Image (tube, rainbow, N blue to C red):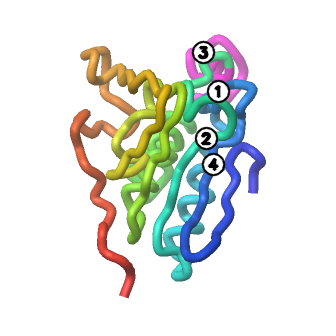
Amino acid sequence: MSDRVTCSIAGGVADVRLNRPEKLNALDPETFAALVEVGEALKTDRSVRAVVLSGEGRGFCAGLDFSSFQAMAGEGEGDTARSRSPPPGQITNSGQQAAYVWTEMPVPVIAAVHGVALGGACRSPWGPICASSPPTPGCRSWRCAGAHPDMTGRPCSAVSSASTSPRS
């Protein structure tokens, strides 16, 4: 497992944390991969009854780490077609799947937001239940501003399709 996302389970609750506090937990390709890896593992872990997503440090997530996406913009090295296209059998690319995997959870997902929450960090797929604590300045989604679709193409007020009933 990557050090970009940590996960511990206690008492049936998975504590999933973005772990790049020096970058306000900004999302980069490694973080996307780690979120997918952790999410996929938790989907099949029958001991998990709920998931709490949060961020280490002084903010939940600053959105995309643009400095790490130069290759996607064609300014650097890398396979941009692979990162933008869904793998065979999936409907989402790697960045979208990092958010979408949480909508596939068979248990409630709670986003515990504090500090900064920008762009993809504040999308509903992180969890249908969002708890924030002062001084959270709020969430700024580019899609809500009319700029472009968000990471999973969901409307701003969408509620995740994750079940709110415990596993049988």
Discs 4/3, front: 4
Question: Which of these two is toward me, 32 or 19?
Answer: 19
The correct choice, above or below, for 64 with respect to 47 in the image is above
The answer for how far apart the CA atoms under marks 4 and 2 are is 5 Å
Residues drawn in magenta: 68-80
**Label located before the other in sequence (3 or 1):** 1
Q: Is label 2 in contact with label 1 (beta carbons under 8 Å)?
A: yes
In the displayed image of the protein, which residue is found farthest to the top?
75
Looking at numbered disc 1 in the image, what kind of residue is underneath it? Leu
Counting from the top left corner in percent of width and height, residue 9 is at: 64, 69
In the displayed image of the protein, which residue is found farthest to the bottom?
168
Disc marking residue 74: 3
Disc marking residue 24: 1
**Label located before the other in sequence (4 or 3):** 4
Question: Which of these two is toward me, 155 or 165?
Answer: 165
Q: Is label 4 in contact with label 1 (beta carbons under 8 Å)?
A: no
Q: Main secondary structure of the magenta part?
A: loop
Question: Which of these two is toward me, 60 or 93?
Answer: 60
The answer for how far apart the CA atoms under marks 2 and 3 are is 30 Å
Discs 3/1, front: 1
- Crowd rating for badge 4 (residues with CA inside 10 Å; few <14, some 14–19, many 20+): many
Counting from the top left corner in percent of width and height, residue 110 is at: 43, 54
Disc marking residue 17: 4
* Secondary structure of the residue carrying numbered label 2: strand
**Label located before the other in sequence (4 or 2):** 4
Residue at 28% x, 16% y is: 145
Residue denoted by label 2: 55
Residue 53 visible in the displayed image: yes
